[in-house]
Image (tube, helix red, strand yellow):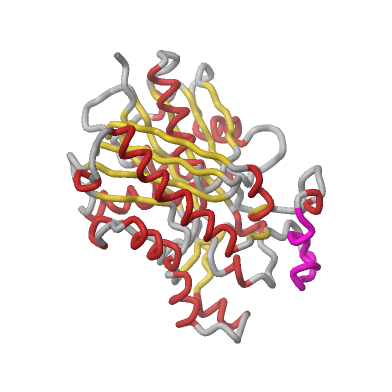
Amino acid sequence: MISAFIADVAYYLPSGSVTNDDLSRAFPEWSVDKISAKTGIEVRHIAGPDEFTSDLATGAARALASAGRVDLNEVDYLIVCTQSPDYFLPTTACMVHENLGLRSDAGAIDINLGCSGYVYGMGLAKGLIESGQVRNVLLITADTYSKFLNPEDKSVRTIFGDAASATFVSSRESSGADISALVYGSDGSGAKHLMVPRGGLRPGADLTHDAEPEARGLQPSSYDLYMNGPEIFNFTLRVVPETFAAVLAKAEISEDEVDLVVVHQANAFMLEHLRKKLAVPTEKFFVHIANCGNTVSSTIPIALAEAAESGVLRRGMNVLVMGFGVGLSWGGFMLRW
């Protein structure tokens, strides 16, 4: 039986940044200390005016290749998970395929998903490999959410940053992390709680008038991303414990056998509430958000890469992974590192 394993993970952060000092100057009613306390974020990396999702995705893949543990010539299929594509069409994946010089017989496809995107993308990669279609999948997550943000909206400007990650998923077991116990969930009735109301083909008001910038006391800019924070928070507190239990049940292991929990890095306030609700000890609940912010589908792979690099994540550990957010959508899986 063919199985899928994570061979390596890397990520890319653009050089531009927005610090808490920058935000405090823009919103004097919010001090640096208040922003840090509420979000747990010190710096958000921001793509430049001429830097787009395909550029970040390409950077992450090249960072992965430069580590020397994988060969991009072996990629049979490229998945790019993004909600901020360079264009409606062509697919960003085809552009990244060209940038990386991947083989012409390698597939390339975009998937549109946010905070749970890494989980869903991993499920697709695992399915492609274990069904015998391909041997190696390059899973990239990449977003430039900063380009969606209204400059006057401090509720989202304090949270989101831009980034990309690259994960090489392979049928080769050597030194790889085993992927198992995938679970998923969706609730489209909550789509209106986190959305970009402008720039698509359909008006955002068709979902909710609350998303219109005028309804929020903002001058319209370009895309004007909208987030109903309380609704997203309540949704998360509801589905994450259920997902946690579902992954454990599917993996047939107990909570005590989980060595590390890595969830979507939304913000420090939410993460601490989740940790307490799940009753996970602090040392088993990995947080990496201070120096990059909420990077949507890239938060989990960035955290995994940082946990491995810092020695917190070691070979043989059982890691429970969960993503949740825009859609509304959620999912989780187990890794045997």
Q: Is residue 89 magenta?
A: no
Indicate the position of residue 59 as horizontal and vertical percent values.
47, 45
Task: Looking at the picture, tell me which residue is in the foreground, 172 or 156.
Answer: 156
- Is 322 displayed left or right of 87 in the figure? left
Q: Residue at x 25, y 25 (%)?
A: 173
Indicate the position of residue 330 as horizontal and vertical percent values.
50, 43
Question: Residue 250 sits in which quadrant?
Answer: top left
In the image, is residue 128 above or below residue 264?
above
- Is 224 displayed left or right of 237 in the figure? right
Q: Residue at x 53, y 36 (%)?
A: 80
Q: Residue at x 77, y 73 (%)?
A: 217
The stretch of residues the image draws in magenta is 208-220
In the image, is residue 197 above or below residue 151?
above
Quarter of the image for the C terminus: give it: top left
Quarter of the image for the N terminus: give it: top left
Q: Is residue 214 magenta?
A: yes
**Number of on-image labels:** 0
Task: Looking at the picture, tell me which residue is in the foreground, 58 or 276.
Answer: 276
Indicate the position of residue 307 as horizontal and vertical percent values.
28, 52
Task: Looking at the picture, tell me which residue is in the foreground, 286 or 21.
Answer: 286
In the image, is residue 112 above or below residue 71?
below
Question: Residue 64 sits in which quadrant?
Answer: top left
In the image, is residue 246 above or below residue 230?
above
Task: Looking at the picture, tell me which residue is in the foreground, 95 or 125.
Answer: 125
Question: Residue 226 sits in which quadrant?
Answer: bottom right
Indicate the position of residue 304 as horizontal and vertical percent values.
33, 48
- Is 69 displayed left or right of 200 in the figure? left
